[in-house]
Image: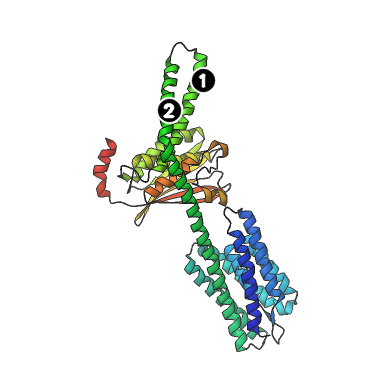
Amino acid sequence: MTSTSHFLINLIGILLLLLIVQFWLNRLHQNPFVTEIVMGLSLSATVVLCMLYPFHTNGGVIFNLRFIPFVLGCLYSHKITSMWLTFLIICLRLMHGLEASWFSCVSLLIFFLITTKLKPFYTNLSMTKKIIISGILMLFMSTWIIVGVKFLFHVPITIELFFSYILIQSFGILLIVYIMESNKEKQSLLYKIIRMEKVEVVSHLAASISHEVRNPLTTTRGFLQLLNESKAIPKAEKGYLTVAIQELDQAERIIRDYLTFAKPAPEEIESLNLKKEIERAINIIVPLANMNIVELSSELESCYIKGNAGLFQQVLVNLLKNAIEAMPSGGTLSILGSVEKTLAKVTIADNGVGMNDLQRNRLGEPYFSTKEIRGTGLGMMVVFRIVESMNGSINVESELGKGTRITLTFPLTPSVEKSNSYIRILN
């Protein structure tokens, strides 16, 4: 059988196994640890599959497509997984003897260092750039191996072997990266659609029942307030009335959050000075920070964005309050307001308990909260809705035990609008 046939069989085996694994990984809200284990096992299986069915040259040197799962592991998996794949390939390769394997093992270690350094840059690229970079990387690796074997071991390399090894391996990585990135984009789109449907349900629910529920709540609170002011009721029993009033106020706040969701956009749009709005929110949150031994640090740049002052304050206070509550033993809360080209950015960073990938991805979903029984999930749900209504975006970075960084991005608005809008705010 020719080298082309061997390599195509290798490639088909890799594709089948990875497609099966991708189907399993595409389920929503996968545990990151389980995902990493499944990814590591599947890549290990593809390495073994390739090395069990190699192409043997006349000089005793073997060729296979083991570099495809190796590169995928280095670029898409945890560093431990890529280290394991490197160790596995070296062990399997040394079974053929050190004399025939030393060049392959040394090359593998060099490629491991290159891909490890490349991964942070690679992760933030677009799908097209990822395909191009992975293709160039595999082309370099394939050419390195086949040229090295030719000149170090003086093995005769046919034209068919030369082109089939380089082209099939390079085409294989291009195809697999395209499939993986396409699946990732489709999964992200599906997740957004599901999230939007949940938000739509909450919006309709809020619009249909909020007013009807609010009316009896307001009436009940009024009568309880009158009873609480009555001198005929003993002071000891008034404590029960106070608790009842507080619970009604809590119900009122939850309904107000629902109503915020039901409104597609703020009623009054103003030009907001980002620096002054953040300073105002910090002043509101200072007492809570002092109670929790949290140090506040801010670095703010003055710029203007469009939005509703009251709703924007709701966003900032919610995020600052969550950050403080994420540091039960105290810590530092940093607030950065900056301008990048045509965008205004607000970054809120804490060094609290942090979140895992599953919690981070579900942040902003209706009824999902990292506070367990202490939270309803409505606060962050409202934050996402308000930011979206301001044509902004939210980016959340978090790691367990190291803290969370939330970045809000808004389009800038010319500062010439500030005079009229600020007179309206001050009045």
Name the residue tied to disc 2.
216
Instruction: Say which of 77 and 5 sits in front.
Output: 5
Residue 69 in percent (x, y) is at 62, 69
The amino acid type found where label 2 is placed reads Pro
Measured in 3D between alpha carbons, the distance from the residue under mark 2 to the one under mark 1, in whole angstroms, is 19 Å
- Image height check: is 163 above or below 255? below
Residue 279 in percent (x, y) is at 38, 40
Q: Is residue 77 visible?
A: no
Q: Quadrant of residue 137?
A: bottom right
Instruction: Say which of 15 and 277 sits in front.
Output: 15
Q: Quadrant of residue 167?
A: bottom right
Where residue 240 is drawn, which disc sits there?
1
For label 1, the SS is helix
Residue 3 in percent (x, y) is at 65, 83
Residue 309 in percent (x, y) is at 34, 41
Q: Residue furthest top?
A: 232
- Image height check: is 426 above or below 42? above
Q: Using residue 328 as the reference point, say whether residue 314 is left or right of it.
A: left
Q: Residues within 10 Å of mark 2 (few under 14, many from 20)?
A: few
For label 2, the SS is helix
Of the two numbered discs 2 and 1 in the rendering, the one whose residue sits closer to the viewer: 2
Quarter of the image where the C terminus is located: top left
Q: How is the image coloured?
A: rainbow
Instruction: Say which of 273 and 18 sits in front.
Output: 18
